[in-house]
Image (cartoon, helix red, strand yellow):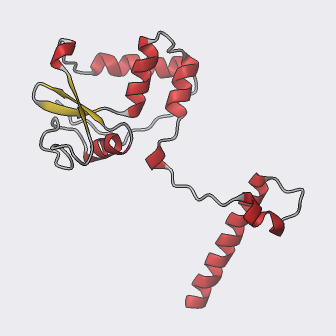
């Protein structure tokens, strides 16, 4: 059995291509079947006996997958004496499927959602910087100018340090 990795990414040009890929992956996957009452959902948080140690997780479960589950959904499933992190995307897809509302559009929304811990942002209230830009500038133009100013300042500092 191969180890599971969570560094994969792919871009699909259509929903049919996405669903075809999922069918292909599904046909090559190894699945364990069990009664639902054999699955035990456990919290994955600072009080969990299994966190941060990975020894209770199934072979091949990456520390990144555990960390992602810890930071987002905070759940793991225990099956056959091993833990598996529950990823938020899988959980949302399952919810939509059970509600019979899983459409290509719903998949696109779920898959397109940025994970909280995957994107750092800096928020500056617009009123703090609006006075420095022409009134006709949009917030996107202001953001672009701020980035340019930061880049220019960075290059200046680097040049002065040399």
Q: Return the residue nearer the eye: 43 or 106.
A: 43
- Counting labels gives 0
Looking at the image, which residue sits at the far front? 47
Looking at the image, which residue sits at the far top? 100
Q: Return the residue nearer the eye: 75 or 142.
A: 75
Residue 138, x across and y down, in percent: 81, 53
Q: Quadrant of residue 24?
A: top left
Residue 115, x across and y down, in percent: 47, 42
Residue 143, compared with residue 50, is above or below; it is below
The residue under the point 18% across, 33% down is: 83
Residue 53, x across and y down, in percent: 16, 48
Q: Return the residue nearer the eye: 26 or 47.
A: 47
The residue under the point 52% across, 40% down is: 114
Judge whether residue 33 can be spotted in this image. Answer: no
Judge whether residue 39 can be spotted in this image. Answer: yes
Left or right of 155 in this view: 39 = left
Left or right of 56 in this view: 7 = right
Residue 10, compared with residue 79, is above or below; it is below
Position of the C terminus by quadrant: bottom right
Q: Return the residue nearer the eye: 146 or 10.
A: 146
Q: Quadrant of residue 81?
A: top left
Residue 118, compared with residue 162, is above or below; it is above
The residue under the point 66% across, 61% down is: 124
Residue 119, x across and y down, in percent: 50, 50
């Amino acid at each position: 059995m191969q180890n599971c990795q969570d560094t994969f990414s792919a871009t699909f040009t259509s929903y049919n291509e996405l669903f075809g890929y999922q069918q292909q992956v599904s046909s090559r996957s190894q699945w364990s079947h069990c009664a639902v009452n054999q699955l035990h959902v456990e919290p994955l948080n600072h009080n969990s006996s299994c966190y941060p140690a990975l020894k209770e997780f199934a072979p091949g479960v990456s520390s990144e997958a555990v960390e992602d589950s810890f930071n987002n959904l905070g759940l793991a499933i225990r099956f056959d004496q091993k833990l598996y992190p529950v990823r938020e995307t899988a959980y949302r897809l399952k919810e939509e499927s059970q509600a019979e509302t899983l459409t290509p559009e719903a998949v696109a929304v779920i898959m397109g959602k940025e994970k909280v811990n995957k994107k750092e942002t800096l928020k500056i209230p617009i009123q703090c910087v609006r006075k420095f830009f022409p009134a006709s500038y949009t917030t996107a133009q202001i953001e672009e100018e701020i980035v340019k100013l930061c880049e220019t300042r960075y290059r200046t500092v680097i040049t002065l340090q040399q």
